[in-house]
Image (cartoon, grey):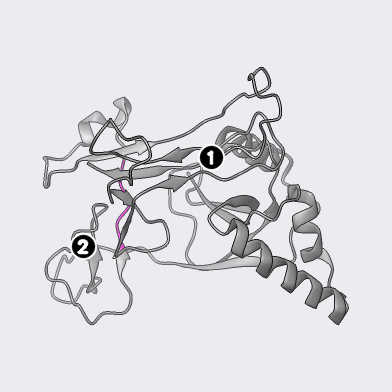
Amino acid sequence: IYMIVWVEKVLRGTDIDSSIEPYFKSTLKNKEKDKLLKEYGNTFQRLGKYRQPFAWGAIPLFSNQGKLRVAGEQGVTLSRARADEGVEQILDILKKRQQKNTGDKRPLPAQFNFHFEQLYPPLSEDTQYPKAVLTPSLLPIAPFDENEKEVVREIQEFQDKSSIHDIQANMEYVNHLYIYPESVNFTKHKDSNSRNITCKISVKSVDDDPLSVGLPVIYDRYSQNSNKVEYRTRVNYHKKTPVFAEEIKLRL
């Protein structure tokens, strides 16, 4: 099991390599920096709701024996994203790196630092347990300390057939829908100029008005206090056959 970090940026109007290249230059002149900042500001105003892939990083969480292999501070090196990289392609890259015991030959000059800590249930009065825990449905688990700054958010576990005996009795009602867009192909579309493609996901209360605002039932990826009325997938610049690697979570 890997923890994968996706980094995105506002769609700039250029391919991925051109968008990433300025971040590899450690000696940009002040004029070049000012020009880029001005360009990014104008781009954000025009294309702020559209994103494009930027970079990704991964770290294995368990050893081959199934034991947790991460503890304390861990750094995740970032690799530049590619337009045709989905989850399967990322896993193939990680598998090849593990076999050859190598890393990215030209990583981004930055990394994410994480602190890993295994949390145990309150087995005794001396056991330290988080004071503020939210379920995957963002429901607080009592006792919940409203003043606690560090909130623990549980991850939804998907059971497969091999672990069917580990399924516990239902503790809450869960009504979620997970959507995983894979790819689209516009090479034979009647509009041959179709490019910069994004998929828009929304849930409507009526069918007679396709332009109506969706229901606020899509979990916000960047906040745990609000839901969104729509979700747009990342844009692969000038790609007629984009590959997606995103998860959209809806509250039904």
The amino acid type of the residue labelled 2 equals Pro
- In the foreground, 227 or 125: 227
| Disc 1 element | loop
Main structural element of the magenta stretch: helix, strand or loop?
loop
Residue 227 visible? yes
Residue linked to disc 1? 245
Q: Residue at x 44, y 35 (%)?
A: 180
Q: Could you tell me residue 65's position as x and y percent? A: 46, 42
Residue 155, magenta (yes or no): yes
The amino acid type of the residue labelled 1 equals Ala
- In the foreground, 34 or 175: 34
Q: Is residue 214 above or below residue 160?
A: below
- In the foreground, 129 or 93: 93
The number of numbered badges drawn on the structure is: 2
Q: Residue at x 49, y 55 (%)?
A: 69
Q: Residue at x 26, y 79 (%)?
A: 148
Q: Report the span colored magenta.
A: 153-157
Residue linked to disc 2? 121
Along the horizontal axis of the image, is 100 left or right of 138? right
Q: Could you tell me residue 236's position as x and y percent? A: 66, 41
Q: Is residue 30 above or below residue 42?
A: below
Residue 166, magenta (yes or no): no
Question: In 3D space, how far apart are the residues under numbered discs 1 and 2 (Cα atoms)?
Answer: 33 Å
User: In the rendering, which numbered label is found on residue 77?
Assistant: none
Q: Could you tell me residue 67's position as x and y percent? A: 43, 49
Along the horizontal axis of the image, is 77 left or right of 174? right
Q: Are marks 1 and 2 in contact (CB under 8 Å)?
A: no
